[in-house]
């Protein structure tokens, strides 16, 4: 079982930056691929970025490519660096983990463990 806790959300002006963190508890977390998703009011939850458990390979949604960077350290933390933020990035951001040893994926249903979310608000 994996438990995830996000932090780092807040209010920022357009063009600004935020860094989200996801702290994990549970055994052998290094074997889990991790993703970030977001959900804006009235919209479905959508994929943002993911990083593979195996070799650190990353994948991004087109809407954030070149602005957001996902990374993880050697312990239990995953990060989402968000630069050049836009008002349309406003959403609740969720950290999620797959089952162990799953290949990297952008599909919401492939992630089994979820954090409670952190609010990101970008003002124009």
Image: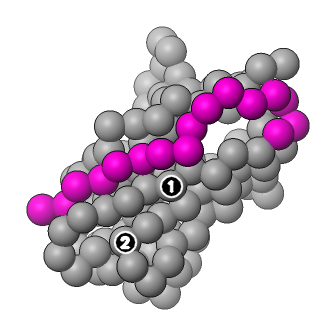
Side of 16 relative to 119 (left or right): right
Circle 1 crowding by C-alpha within 10 Å: few under 14, some 14–19, many from 20: many
Q: Is residue 12 left or right of residue 21?
A: right
Q: Quadrant of the N terminus?
A: bottom left
Percent position (x, y) of residue 100?
23, 74
Q: Which residues are magenta?
A: 1-16
Q: Can the viewer see residue 47 in this picture? A: no
For residue 109: magenta? Answer: no
The label shown at residue 76 is 2
Vertical comparison of 41 with 102: above or below: above
Which residue is identified by label 1?
21
Marker disc for residue 109 = none
Nearer to us in this view, 44 or 97: 97
SS for tag 1? strand
Residue placed at 79% from the left, 57% from the top?
66
Q: Cβ–Cβ below 8 Å for labels 2 and 1?
A: no
* N-term-proximal mark, 2 vs 1: 1
Foreground pick, 74 / 86? 74
**x then y, percent, for residue 86:** 78, 31
């Amino acid at each position: 079982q994996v438990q995830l806790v996000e932090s780092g959300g807040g209010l920022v002006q357009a063009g600004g930056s935020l860094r989200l963190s996801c702290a994990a508890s549970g055994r052998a977390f290094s074997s889990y691929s991790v993703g970030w998703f977001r959900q804006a009011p009235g919209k479905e939850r959508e994929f943002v970025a993911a990083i593979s458990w195996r070799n650190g390979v990353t994948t991004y949604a087109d809407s954030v490519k070149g602005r957001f960077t996902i990374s993880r350290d050697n312990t239990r933390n995953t990060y989402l660096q968000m630069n050049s933020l836009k008002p349309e990035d406003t959403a609740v951001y969720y950290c999620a983990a797959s089952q162990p040893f799953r290949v990297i994926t952008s599909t919401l249903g492939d992630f089994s463990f979820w954090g409670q979310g952190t609010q990101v608000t970008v003002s124009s």
